[in-house]
Amino acid sequence: MQIRDKRLILTGSAGGIGSALATALAKRGARLVLIDRNGEAVTAVAQGLAQAHAVAADLSTADGCKQAVDAALAHMGGVDLLINLAGLNSFRNFEAETPEAIERLMHVNLLAPMLLTRAVLPGMIAQKSGRIVNVGSVFGSIGFAWFTAYSASKFGLRGFSEALRRELADTGVRVTYVAPRAVKTPMNDDAVMRMGAATGMNMDPPERVVARIIDAIDDDHKDTYIGFPESLFVRINVILPRLVDIALAKQNRIAAKFARRE
Ligand SMILES: NC(=O)c1ccc[n+]([C@@H]2O[C@H](COP(=O)([O-])OP(=O)(O)OC[C@H]3O[C@@H](n4cnc5c(N)ncnc54)[C@H](OP(=O)(O)O)[C@@H]3O)[C@@H](O)[C@H]2O)c1
Protein backbone atom coordinates (compact mmCIF):
# COMPACT_ATOMS: atom_id res chain seq x y z
CA MET A 1 0.00 0.00 0.00
CA GLN A 2 1.26 3.45 -0.84
CA ILE A 3 1.50 5.58 2.32
CA ARG A 4 1.46 9.08 0.79
CA ASP A 5 -1.81 10.98 1.43
CA LYS A 6 -3.39 8.00 3.19
CA ARG A 7 -5.64 8.81 6.18
CA LEU A 8 -4.02 7.00 9.07
CA ILE A 9 -4.81 6.31 12.74
CA LEU A 10 -1.86 5.38 14.95
CA THR A 11 -2.50 4.38 18.57
CA GLY A 12 0.29 4.44 21.13
CA SER A 13 1.84 7.35 19.22
CA ALA A 14 3.56 8.91 22.22
CA GLY A 15 5.43 5.70 23.09
CA GLY A 16 8.92 4.52 22.21
CA ILE A 17 7.97 2.85 18.93
CA GLY A 18 4.93 5.09 18.31
CA SER A 19 6.73 8.45 18.35
CA ALA A 20 9.41 7.17 15.94
CA LEU A 21 6.75 5.58 13.72
CA ALA A 22 4.66 8.78 13.67
CA THR A 23 7.71 10.73 12.51
CA ALA A 24 8.54 8.19 9.78
CA LEU A 25 4.93 8.08 8.53
CA ALA A 26 4.70 11.88 8.45
CA LYS A 27 7.90 11.98 6.36
CA ARG A 28 6.22 9.57 3.95
CA GLY A 29 3.32 12.01 3.51
CA ALA A 30 0.55 10.27 5.51
CA ARG A 31 -2.30 12.26 7.08
CA LEU A 32 -2.12 11.27 10.72
CA VAL A 33 -4.44 11.07 13.68
CA LEU A 34 -2.17 10.26 16.62
CA ILE A 35 -3.86 8.69 19.62
CA ASP A 36 -2.47 8.19 23.11
CA ARG A 37 -3.56 8.33 26.71
CA ASN A 38 -1.34 11.27 27.71
CA GLY A 39 -2.66 14.37 25.90
CA GLU A 40 0.43 16.49 26.50
CA ALA A 41 2.79 13.80 25.25
CA VAL A 42 0.83 13.02 22.09
CA THR A 43 0.42 16.74 21.32
CA ALA A 44 4.18 17.16 21.62
CA VAL A 45 4.73 14.35 19.08
CA ALA A 46 2.18 15.84 16.65
CA GLN A 47 3.55 19.37 16.94
CA GLY A 48 6.66 18.92 14.85
CA LEU A 49 4.95 16.86 12.13
CA ALA A 50 3.17 17.85 8.93
CA GLN A 51 -0.52 16.81 8.73
CA ALA A 52 -0.66 15.33 12.25
CA HIS A 53 -3.56 15.75 14.66
CA ALA A 54 -3.31 14.63 18.30
CA VAL A 55 -6.18 12.95 20.16
CA ALA A 56 -6.03 12.07 23.87
CA ALA A 57 -8.05 8.95 24.60
CA ASP A 58 -7.94 6.10 27.09
CA LEU A 59 -8.14 2.83 25.17
CA SER A 60 -8.75 0.78 28.31
CA THR A 61 -12.52 1.38 28.02
CA ALA A 62 -15.07 0.95 25.23
CA ASP A 63 -16.06 4.62 25.64
CA GLY A 64 -12.45 5.73 25.23
CA CYS A 65 -12.11 3.64 22.05
CA LYS A 66 -15.29 5.18 20.62
CA GLN A 67 -14.11 8.68 21.51
CA ALA A 68 -10.79 8.00 19.73
CA VAL A 69 -12.30 6.68 16.53
CA ASP A 70 -15.06 9.33 16.43
CA ALA A 71 -12.41 12.06 16.73
CA ALA A 72 -10.36 10.49 13.94
CA LEU A 73 -13.35 10.12 11.61
CA ALA A 74 -14.49 13.69 12.33
CA HIS A 75 -11.00 14.98 11.52
CA MET A 76 -10.24 12.95 8.36
CA GLY A 77 -13.67 11.89 7.10
CA GLY A 78 -12.52 8.28 6.75
CA VAL A 79 -9.60 5.96 7.45
CA ASP A 80 -7.33 4.10 5.02
CA LEU A 81 -4.88 2.67 7.51
CA LEU A 82 -5.32 1.77 11.18
CA ILE A 83 -2.19 0.88 13.14
CA ASN A 84 -3.02 -0.69 16.50
CA LEU A 85 0.22 -0.11 18.39
CA ALA A 86 -0.79 0.98 21.93
CA GLY A 87 0.04 -1.69 24.45
CA LEU A 88 0.69 -2.48 28.10
CA ASN A 89 3.15 -4.96 29.51
CA SER A 90 3.18 -6.85 32.79
CA PHE A 91 6.14 -8.81 34.17
CA ARG A 92 4.97 -10.60 37.29
CA ASN A 93 3.77 -13.89 38.75
CA PHE A 94 0.31 -14.50 37.32
CA GLU A 95 -1.26 -14.98 40.76
CA ALA A 96 -0.06 -11.47 41.65
CA GLU A 97 -2.10 -9.88 38.82
CA THR A 98 -5.24 -8.12 40.04
CA PRO A 99 -8.51 -8.69 38.17
CA GLU A 100 -8.54 -4.95 37.34
CA ALA A 101 -5.02 -5.05 35.90
CA ILE A 102 -5.84 -8.14 33.78
CA GLU A 103 -8.95 -6.42 32.45
CA ARG A 104 -7.07 -3.22 31.62
CA LEU A 105 -4.26 -5.08 29.87
CA MET A 106 -6.67 -7.21 27.82
CA HIS A 107 -8.67 -4.12 26.88
CA VAL A 108 -5.71 -2.06 25.69
CA ASN A 109 -3.85 -4.93 23.98
CA LEU A 110 -6.75 -6.88 22.45
CA LEU A 111 -10.22 -5.34 22.81
CA ALA A 112 -9.17 -1.83 21.71
CA PRO A 113 -7.69 -3.12 18.41
CA MET A 114 -10.90 -5.14 17.85
CA LEU A 115 -13.21 -2.20 18.64
CA LEU A 116 -11.24 0.31 16.57
CA THR A 117 -11.09 -2.12 13.66
CA ARG A 118 -14.82 -2.77 13.87
CA ALA A 119 -15.47 0.98 13.75
CA VAL A 120 -13.32 1.72 10.67
CA LEU A 121 -14.13 -1.44 8.68
CA PRO A 122 -17.45 -0.39 7.11
CA GLY A 123 -15.75 2.61 5.46
CA MET A 124 -12.82 0.51 4.25
CA ILE A 125 -15.10 -2.20 2.86
CA ALA A 126 -17.24 0.44 1.10
CA GLN A 127 -14.17 1.95 -0.58
CA LYS A 128 -12.79 -1.56 -1.30
CA SER A 129 -9.40 -0.70 0.19
CA GLY A 130 -7.68 -0.24 3.51
CA ARG A 131 -5.27 -1.87 5.88
CA ILE A 132 -5.30 -2.88 9.53
CA VAL A 133 -1.85 -3.29 11.11
CA ASN A 134 -1.83 -5.04 14.48
CA VAL A 135 1.39 -4.88 16.46
CA GLY A 136 1.72 -8.03 18.54
CA SER A 137 4.85 -9.64 19.89
CA VAL A 138 6.95 -12.77 19.68
CA PHE A 139 5.22 -13.45 23.04
CA GLY A 140 2.02 -13.83 20.98
CA SER A 141 3.46 -17.02 19.49
CA ILE A 142 5.62 -18.28 22.35
CA GLY A 143 3.93 -18.07 25.74
CA PHE A 144 6.47 -16.58 28.14
CA ALA A 145 6.57 -17.34 31.85
CA TRP A 146 6.02 -14.26 34.05
CA PHE A 147 4.48 -12.44 31.06
CA THR A 148 1.39 -14.65 31.13
CA ALA A 149 -1.34 -12.01 30.84
CA TYR A 150 0.66 -10.10 28.21
CA SER A 151 1.30 -13.30 26.22
CA ALA A 152 -2.41 -14.18 26.37
CA SER A 153 -3.36 -10.76 25.00
CA LYS A 154 -0.89 -11.00 22.13
CA PHE A 155 -1.95 -14.60 21.27
CA GLY A 156 -5.46 -13.18 21.02
CA LEU A 157 -4.32 -10.34 18.78
CA ARG A 158 -2.55 -12.78 16.46
CA GLY A 159 -5.67 -14.97 16.23
CA PHE A 160 -7.85 -11.92 15.58
CA SER A 161 -5.51 -10.81 12.78
CA GLU A 162 -5.43 -14.23 11.12
CA ALA A 163 -9.19 -14.80 11.22
CA LEU A 164 -10.00 -11.26 10.09
CA ARG A 165 -7.52 -11.47 7.21
CA ARG A 166 -9.26 -14.61 5.95
CA GLU A 167 -12.70 -13.05 6.46
CA LEU A 168 -11.74 -9.94 4.45
CA ALA A 169 -9.92 -11.80 1.66
CA ASP A 170 -12.33 -10.68 -1.07
CA THR A 171 -12.93 -7.12 0.13
CA GLY A 172 -9.74 -5.24 -0.80
CA VAL A 173 -9.03 -4.67 2.92
CA ARG A 174 -5.73 -6.17 4.11
CA VAL A 175 -4.58 -7.24 7.57
CA THR A 176 -0.95 -7.24 8.71
CA TYR A 177 0.36 -8.69 11.96
CA VAL A 178 3.77 -7.50 13.16
CA ALA A 179 5.58 -9.33 15.96
CA PRO A 180 8.68 -7.61 17.36
CA ARG A 181 11.03 -9.24 19.84
CA ALA A 182 12.11 -7.08 22.82
CA VAL A 183 12.58 -3.40 21.98
CA LYS A 184 14.41 -0.68 23.94
CA THR A 185 11.45 1.49 24.98
CA PRO A 186 9.86 2.73 28.23
CA MET A 187 7.53 -0.30 28.12
CA ASN A 188 10.36 -2.35 29.58
CA ASP A 189 10.87 -1.14 33.13
CA ASP A 190 13.95 -1.63 35.26
CA ALA A 191 12.97 -5.19 36.29
CA VAL A 192 12.57 -6.28 32.65
CA MET A 193 15.86 -4.62 31.67
CA ARG A 194 17.74 -6.38 34.48
CA MET A 195 16.11 -9.70 33.59
CA GLY A 196 17.01 -9.08 29.91
CA ALA A 197 20.65 -8.45 30.81
CA ALA A 198 20.79 -11.56 33.03
CA THR A 199 19.25 -13.85 30.39
CA GLY A 200 21.00 -12.35 27.35
CA MET A 201 17.71 -11.25 25.80
CA ASN A 202 18.12 -9.60 22.37
CA MET A 203 16.73 -6.05 22.20
CA ASP A 204 16.15 -3.97 19.09
CA PRO A 205 16.14 -0.19 18.80
CA PRO A 206 12.65 1.20 18.00
CA GLU A 207 13.91 2.40 14.59
CA ARG A 208 14.38 -1.21 13.48
CA VAL A 209 10.75 -2.02 14.30
CA VAL A 210 9.56 1.16 12.59
CA ALA A 211 11.42 0.26 9.39
CA ARG A 212 9.90 -3.24 9.40
CA ILE A 213 6.37 -1.92 9.97
CA ILE A 214 6.76 0.47 7.06
CA ASP A 215 8.18 -2.30 4.84
CA ALA A 216 5.20 -4.49 5.78
CA ILE A 217 2.79 -1.74 4.67
CA ASP A 218 4.73 -0.91 1.50
CA ASP A 219 5.08 -4.54 0.42
CA ASP A 220 1.73 -5.90 1.64
CA HIS A 221 3.12 -8.40 4.15
CA LYS A 222 0.68 -10.61 6.02
CA ASP A 223 2.97 -11.42 8.96
CA THR A 224 6.28 -9.89 9.98
CA TYR A 225 8.37 -11.49 12.73
CA ILE A 226 11.32 -9.35 13.74
CA GLY A 227 14.63 -10.87 14.83
CA PHE A 228 16.58 -14.09 14.55
CA PRO A 229 16.65 -16.63 16.24
CA GLU A 230 13.30 -15.55 17.82
CA SER A 231 11.48 -15.96 14.47
CA LEU A 232 12.87 -19.50 14.20
CA PHE A 233 11.72 -20.34 17.76
CA VAL A 234 8.22 -19.20 16.77
CA ARG A 235 8.17 -21.92 14.10
CA ILE A 236 9.75 -24.57 16.33
CA ASN A 237 7.17 -23.81 19.06
CA VAL A 238 4.38 -24.79 16.63
CA ILE A 239 5.92 -28.13 15.68
CA LEU A 240 7.94 -29.10 18.76
CA PRO A 241 6.71 -27.12 21.79
CA ARG A 242 8.42 -29.53 24.23
CA LEU A 243 11.77 -28.57 22.73
CA VAL A 244 11.02 -24.92 23.45
CA ASP A 245 9.95 -25.87 27.03
CA ILE A 246 13.41 -27.37 27.52
CA ALA A 247 15.21 -24.48 25.80
CA LEU A 248 13.42 -21.90 27.98
CA ALA A 249 13.59 -23.73 31.31
CA LYS A 250 16.91 -22.23 32.44
CA GLN A 251 15.93 -18.73 31.27
CA ASN A 252 12.60 -18.99 33.12
CA ARG A 253 14.36 -19.81 36.37
CA ILE A 254 16.63 -16.76 36.01
CA ALA A 255 13.71 -14.52 35.01
CA ALA A 256 11.74 -15.66 38.10
CA LYS A 257 14.24 -13.77 40.28
CA PHE A 258 13.25 -10.46 38.66
CA ALA A 259 9.48 -10.89 38.17
CA ARG A 260 7.20 -8.91 40.48
CA ARG A 261 5.36 -10.89 43.14
CA GLU A 262 2.84 -8.20 44.03
N1 LIG B 1 8.98 -2.73 23.85
C1 LIG B 1 8.99 -4.02 23.61
O1 LIG B 1 9.86 -4.77 24.12
C2 LIG B 1 7.97 -4.63 22.70
C3 LIG B 1 8.20 -5.92 22.20
C4 LIG B 1 7.25 -6.51 21.39
C5 LIG B 1 6.09 -5.82 21.09
N2 LIG B 1 5.89 -4.58 21.60
C6 LIG B 1 4.60 -3.91 21.30
O2 LIG B 1 4.83 -2.69 20.65
C7 LIG B 1 3.78 -1.78 20.99
C8 LIG B 1 4.38 -0.44 21.37
O3 LIG B 1 5.18 -0.62 22.52
P1 LIG B 1 6.35 0.37 22.97
O4 LIG B 1 7.53 -0.47 23.19
O5 LIG B 1 6.43 1.54 22.06
O6 LIG B 1 5.79 0.78 24.40
P2 LIG B 1 5.60 2.20 25.07
O7 LIG B 1 6.80 3.05 24.84
O8 LIG B 1 5.19 1.92 26.47
O9 LIG B 1 4.38 2.80 24.25
C9 LIG B 1 3.07 2.32 24.39
C10 LIG B 1 2.13 3.49 24.30
O10 LIG B 1 0.78 3.03 24.48
C11 LIG B 1 0.15 3.93 25.38
N3 LIG B 1 -0.96 3.38 26.14
C12 LIG B 1 -0.90 2.50 27.17
N4 LIG B 1 -2.12 2.33 27.70
C13 LIG B 1 -2.96 3.12 27.00
C14 LIG B 1 -4.35 3.42 27.10
N5 LIG B 1 -5.11 2.89 28.06
N6 LIG B 1 -4.90 4.26 26.21
C15 LIG B 1 -4.13 4.84 25.26
N7 LIG B 1 -2.82 4.64 25.12
C16 LIG B 1 -2.24 3.79 25.99
C17 LIG B 1 1.26 4.30 26.35
O11 LIG B 1 0.90 5.42 27.10
P3 LIG B 1 1.54 5.60 28.58
O12 LIG B 1 3.00 5.80 28.40
O13 LIG B 1 0.81 6.78 29.12
O14 LIG B 1 1.24 4.35 29.33
C18 LIG B 1 2.42 4.52 25.41
O15 LIG B 1 2.47 5.82 24.90
C19 LIG B 1 2.96 -2.46 22.09
O16 LIG B 1 1.78 -3.01 21.55
C20 LIG B 1 3.87 -3.56 22.57
O17 LIG B 1 3.15 -4.65 23.12
C21 LIG B 1 6.81 -3.96 22.37
Image: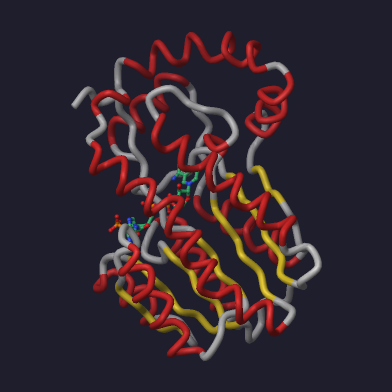
- x 57%, y 52%: residue: 209
89 and 168: which is toward the camera:
168
Q: Quadrant of residue 45?
A: bottom left
100 and 5: which is toward the camera:
100
Q: Is residue 95 above or below residue 209?
A: above
Position in image of residue 116 (x %, y %): 48, 67
6 and 67: which is toward the camera:
67
Q: Quadrant of residue 252?
A: top left
Position in image of residue 109 (x %, y %): 43, 50
Q: Which quadrant, please, contains the C terminus?
A: top left
Position in image of residue 206 (x %, y %): 50, 52
258 and 242: which is toward the camera:
242
- x 26%, y 32%: residue: 97
Q: Which quadrant, please, contains the N terminus?
A: bottom right
Q: Quadrant of residue 245?
A: top right
Q: Residue furthest right?
A: 170
Q: Is residue 130 above or below residue 85?
A: below
